Amino acid sequence: MSWCVRSDEKPVKVSKSVSKVGRFLIATALEEFWETSRPVVFLGEWCRRYSRKDSWAGLGDCVVPDLWADPAVTYRAYEYTRQLYERMLGPVGQALNQLHRVSHSGRYWRIVIGPWLQSYIGILYERYSTIAAALSLYPDLTSAGLEESSWVVPQHSLDFIALVQEDFYNLQLYTRMLQHFGASLMLKPCQARISKAVAPPEAGLANAARRLLKPAFNGPTRFVQRFASVLHDGTYFSAGMQVRLMLATFGSVVRMAPEQLPDTALGPTVARSDLHVEYMANEAFESFALSTIPLDMPRSFVEDFATVGEAARYSYPSRPRAIFSANCWYSKEPFKRWAADAAENGAILLGTQHGGNYGSIEPLPNEDHEMAIVDRYYTWGWLRDGSHGDVVPMPATKLAGRKSIGANNRKQNILYVTTCSPRYQSSFPFTVDHFREYLEWQQRFLGEISESMRSATVVRLHFEDFGWDIGPRLRDRFPGLRFGTWETPFAEALSHCRLYVCDHLSTTFVEALAMDVPTVLFWSPRWNRVRAEAEPYYVALRSVGILHNTPEAAAAAIESIGNVEEWWDDSQRQSARKSFVNQFGLTVKSPTRVWAKELRRYRSRPSKLSVGETL
């Protein structure tokens, strides 16, 4: 059976050879919603947890074909959902204006609701298309869904991201879609069981000391920040560099103190039923999305809108000249509200990247969003046209102060760093099928290197597993395999390894190259589409044996390295590394001086201000 997606992105069946035997649809990994007394069909691999294989191994291998197995299809889906987001952002913002009796600009709502709305549309489209495909293949499907009394509403954007990674909330979404399509459905109540997303632990003595001392600095920081020109938070500047920047700019560049909530919280001042989005839907999916947006929109944009606004006014200065961040555009609702209000009053918004794949991968939704909302965007060395504001290469904030390590034949360990992705698709063009292939590549790589190399390897797993059970998978296949711990900071782990190996295009490999650590990389070009302007730098890494297109090629390269100092210090290899780092991980000897010079320009309010979008 094969599937395709038309230009309008509706799933289309191109073969009718599948049996129409009535089956029970298993949509999630929540086993109390499974009916195993009859033939079943799994909606996707997310249903079949590795740790629970005894529960599903005897149920057959009937899985709805993956609509997104072809990368070209996923890129078309991304473009479709991106354009739909752009068309719907204005009407949704206008609906919120009317609900809250305000008159904010399009840019304001892009800052406040953009990350959620763009993510929501893509996630909803993927789930909707998959359910439609299942029902087209098996018209007589029945399933079990979540009773409406058990449904939950996200508190804020980050809560939504945590929810869509879990079985419970996805069952809620699938239930609504199955009802929409008129499927036979048995509804059950269930108490929400959601393990919230966690942040990576702050390891090391320096971080422990910082956590202890932070409360003592919050009071003075709040006093100083009232007089600062540039207020920053979530920029990845180290604590030491934050202090040096403040001193070098005579207090005009200051890190924000943590948010403080008002003593009294406001109650809901609006009703969700009063939220009406005026939008002319062109397709069935758009009509469905239009009906669910008011139901699923986080409370921070509806019932708690006034409360979040009060928290922003309570926590932050009222008239900043410039606001600088890398990731608070996603993680802090009061910060977003404060920044959006400040921008409407003439403040300059500054942004910088927080991932090593920025400037390389195409498309990258986060990069597109950040460049659309800020007036000046600082990259780690690369340039890009067509953004809302200026794009300026600057020393990478995350790499500032990192010391060069170099090759050392006396070291023994191979540090193998992996990544992880939610079991449920979180954004196009990154798919569950891609990650399944990625897990297979891990097994292929470790199976290809010699026993001696494998015994020297330390695997550093991602701090979240999302239910993939990656550690148990690898332990079962390779008994005795060693695993690192997040108690050891990444930079420290790099300093102890003879060779660093990375199997994904993300941040850590840029850090390793910038710190001059002997590095071997491999990932699938099929799922990592590099921009034309970035491709020459990746070609150069391939030409000198740093980057490889298969796990087998990477394993062979590692086996061939005898004298790591001689291999790594080769002039051509170092030339390719330095060229890449200057473009995608720029570092300088005096980053504080360079950043202080740049940020001092905002000591006075600029005469020309950005004009917000109109709705």
Image (cartoon, grey):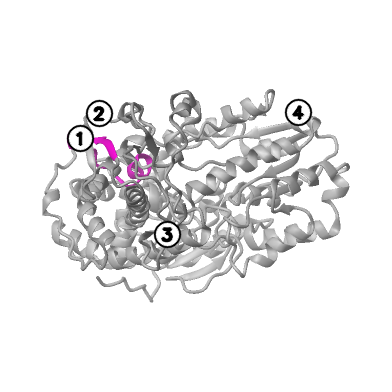
Is disc 1 placed on a helix, strand or loop?
Answer: loop
Q: Distance between the residues labelled 1 and 3?
A: 34 Å
The residue singled out by tag 2 in the image is 190
The residue singled out by tag 4 in the image is 455
Badge 4 crowding class, 10 Å Cα cut-off, few under 14, some 14 to 19, many 20 or more, is: some
N-terminal of the pair, mark 4 or mark 1, is 1
Residue found 39% across the figure and 45% down from its top = 19
Residue 147 circle label:
1
Residue type (three-letter) at the residue carrying disc 2: Cys
- In the displayed structure, 164 sits above or below 193; it is below
Badge 1 crowding class, 10 Å Cα cut-off, few under 14, some 14 to 19, many 20 or more, is: some
Residue type (three-letter) at the residue carrying disc 1: Glu
Residue found 61% across the figure and 41% down from its top = 440
Point out the stretch of residues depicted in magenta.
Answer: 142-163
N-terminal of the pair, mark 2 or mark 3, is 3
Q: Are marks 2 and 1 in contact (CB under 8 Å)?
A: yes
Is disc 3 placed on a helix, strand or loop?
Answer: loop
Is disc 2 placed on a helix, strand or loop?
Answer: loop
Q: Are marks 2 and 3 in contact (CB under 8 Å)?
A: no
Horizontal arrangement in the rendering, residue 14 relative to residue 336 (left or right): right
Query: Where does residue 239 sit, x and y in percent of width and height?
Result: 54, 43
Tally of numbered discs: 4
Residue type (three-letter) at the residue carrying disc 4: Ser
Q: Distance between the residues labelled 2 and 4?
A: 46 Å
The residue singled out by tag 3 in the image is 14
Residue type (three-letter) at the residue carrying disc 3: Val
Res 455 visible: yes
